[in-house]
Image (cartoon, rainbow, N blue to C red):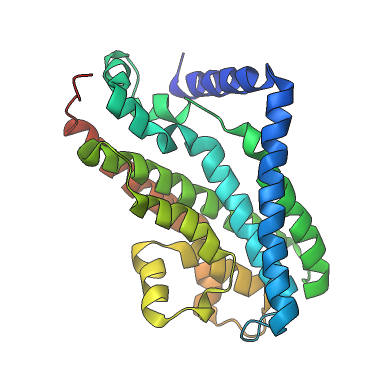
Amino acid sequence: PGPLVLYRRLLAASVRSQLRYPASFLMTGFGTLMISVIEFVAIAALFARFGALKSWTLAEVGVFYAMANVSFTLGEWFGRGFDTFAAQVKSGEFDRVLLRPRTTALQLAGKEFALRRFGRLLQALVVLGWAAPRCQIAWTPGHVLLLAAAVLGGGLFFHAIFVLHATICFWTTESLELTNIISHGGVESAQYPMDIYAAPFRRFFTWIIPLMFVNYYPGLALLRPGAVTARQQLAGWLSPLAGLAFLAAAFLAWRVGVRHYRSTGS
């Protein structure tokens, strides 16, 4: 079969294996749901105490929060195989992957479809459904398309982070907390409007790690269309391209890592 057919079969097999134990599947999903609920309750508690964050209301932050978490869930669903790659390097299991007549990236991408993390997605959609009417977003076809583009770009961005997380393991064997800071820390940062952060932080997450392209600029165009500049409006629409370019760069780094791989001898 072709690569896409094989990838679809791998994902389907992963989903079937998770649904084979429905109680475990539902409990894991419920656990991620409750963790996400507690996170947003903590944000709401801060706004209850301080009223606003700079000039942003809780509902506006809720839109950023929802966009970031939907994007992260999509990236994690399709990138879970890369997220757990360090165990394969330590055990020597990756040697077996290299012997198979398929690309290593395809095998890792199809290794596990983390559908059981659906709780985060559900909670983010609920927050979006609560926050969007309070922000009086005009759901024109353009805004709907912009939101979809932002979520797609964000999903590609976080998938790229997981690929880079795995790539570093070729040299370190163990996964590094630095990549967790960028992946999980990235979604934590994107839950808030990026203009609350210092300028060096914003520049880093624009030109090195393009997080602002895939979350902040689209959110700004949705929430405050009258205040957004033409450049910021364009940056919001470039979200899928920014995510795709970052993912392409991550896979190039992955190819370099595969060429430098040395078995642990396990």
Picture quadrant of residue 56: bottom right
Residue 222 lies left or right of residue 198; in this view the side is right
In the image shown, does 52 or 106 lie closer to the viewer? 52
The C terminus lies in quadrant: top left
Residue 113 lies left or right of residue 265; in this view the side is right
Residue at 71% in and 46% down: 33
In the image shown, does 262 or 146 lie closer to the viewer? 262
Residue at 53% in and 49% down: 155
Tell me, yes or no, if residue 121 can be seen here.
no
Picture quadrant of residue 129: bottom right
Measured as percent of width and height from the top left, residue 148 is found at 64, 54
Measured as percent of width and height from the top left, residue 222 is found at 67, 71
Q: On screen, 32 above or below 235?
A: above
Q: On screen, 245 above or below 106?
A: below
Measured as percent of width and height from the top left, residue 28 is found at 66, 34
Picture quadrant of residue 139: bottom right
Residue 123 lies left or right of residue 102; in this view the side is right
Q: On screen, 195 above or below 84?
A: below
Tell me, yes or no, if residue 71 can be seen here.
yes
Count of numbered circles on the image: 0
Measured as percent of width and height from the top left, residue 212 is found at 48, 67
